[in-house]
Amino acid sequence: MYTRLLFASLVCLLFSTCQTPDVPIPATETLYIFPYQSQVDASNINCGYKAYEWGGDQLKGFIRNRSTEISTEELMALGQEIHNTHLPFPVIAHERAIWLEDIVDAMKPHLVKNDFPHYTYVVDAPFLNAFTIPGGNIYITSELLDAVQNKHELAYIIGHELGHNENEHTKELALLNRFIERDDIDIWKRVALKVGSGICNKSDELECDIASIYLLEKAGYDPELALGGIDLLRHLSKAPEDVVERVLLGFFSTHPWSDERDECVRAYVKDNKVTVGCAKIYQSTGIINAKYSSLDLYRYPLKREDLRLQQLSPNESVHVVCTGVHQLYQSNEWLYVQYQNSEGTFLGWVNKRGVDIVE
Ligand SMILES: [Zn+2]
């Protein structure tokens, strides 16, 4: 202990900021740091969808290996054809239609794939639903648009539909439909592929939920308010099977929610909400000695590679600025520190468990 105190004093002499650390106290802010962006692989999300994802990958591989590539132009032409001749319900004007455009505009800068204009349409239909087609058009029923409480909920639905394009689901399904239509495919294979694709859609839907959470937050909407969109879709009444089956060619509509999918998305939002700020501020000097090698200094108190500022070697010392606000959903406790080395001065968060505090 004496050695540590001596060491701490020496560091204080070397860095004259010890007695009155001239470091800014970070303002408290609540933010979301989501591990996934708009391209998501359901097999990496621990929500029991691995088998569906595996099945989906096999099916998509089977189709892809037997198909020629489908171009952006072909997808847009297919979308145009569906829009012009196969929509089961009339497109109508709606006073909230501007919301759809606003949301798409706000999400667009955050899309990875910007192949399509993503036109949005309201269709006059007496049930809750939304869907997207190859070429990126998004359709929402008037009933669903009337039912959303706010733009946040609508953003959840739009983000989900954009997610189908970001993750190439619409393209895969266009390939599937083209394959099934081939003359040399027998009826049983058609049925098997159709049923198989329906089952494997489960993981696609989860991917789009997770993509939507990222997109809507980036677009300035509130993920927690947006979860109301899930509640709405849980009450989704199914569209008449024959019409949808016949006319929409099985392209994506939002599907009835499963409980595990609901839980998964809610937990995802909850677990990635972070409050960053100081609870206990150290007025005098808090010197900490790193106990472990590779103690990381983060921009925010989360273990994310892209948020890492510096690595601290064992026994390196830093000034403690404060103890972080307790995180409801994160098990680690954090210290906000000032760290100096030959490259400069760094302010950031370290895991409390990796350090000894010597005051
Ligand atoms: Zn969907």
Image (tube, grey):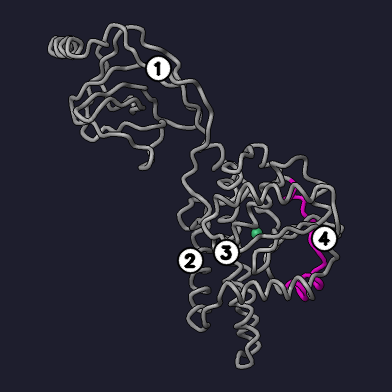
Above or below, comparing residue 75 to residue 237 in the picture: below
**Could you tell me which residue is drawn at 49 percent across and 73 percent down?**
58
Looking at the rendered image, the disc whose residue lies closer to the viewer, 1 or 2, is 1
Q: Which residues are magenta?
A: 232-248
Q: Quadrant of ligand 1?
A: bottom right
Q: Secondary structure at mark 1?
A: loop
**Could you tell me which residue is drawn at 49 percent across and 42 percent down?**
34
Dot 1 surroundings within 10 Å: few (below 14), some, or many (20 or more)?
few
Dot 3 surroundings within 10 Å: few (below 14), some, or many (20 or more)?
some
Which label number is shown at residue 24? 1
Given the image, on which type of amino acid does mark 2 rest?
Trp
Dot 2 surroundings within 10 Å: few (below 14), some, or many (20 or more)?
some
The CA distance from mark 3 to mark 4 is 24 Å
Given the image, on which type of amino acid does mark 1 rest?
Pro
The CA distance from mark 4 to mark 2 is 35 Å
Given the image, on which type of amino acid does mark 4 rest?
Val
Looking at the rendered image, the disc whose residue lies closer to the viewer, 4 or 1, is 1
* Residue 220 in sight here: yes
Foreground residue, 242 or 110? Answer: 110
**Residue that carries the numbered disc 4 in the rendered image:** 123
Residue 287 image offset from top left, x and y in percent: 26, 15
Q: Earlier in the sequence, mark 4 or mark 2?
A: 2
The CA distance from mark 1 to mark 2 is 49 Å
Q: Secondary structure at mark 4?
A: strand
**Residue that carries the numbered disc 2 in the rendered image:** 54
Instruction: Name the quadrant containing residue 24.
Output: top left
The CA distance from mark 4 to mark 1 is 53 Å
Given the image, on which type of amino acid does mark 3 rest?
Asp
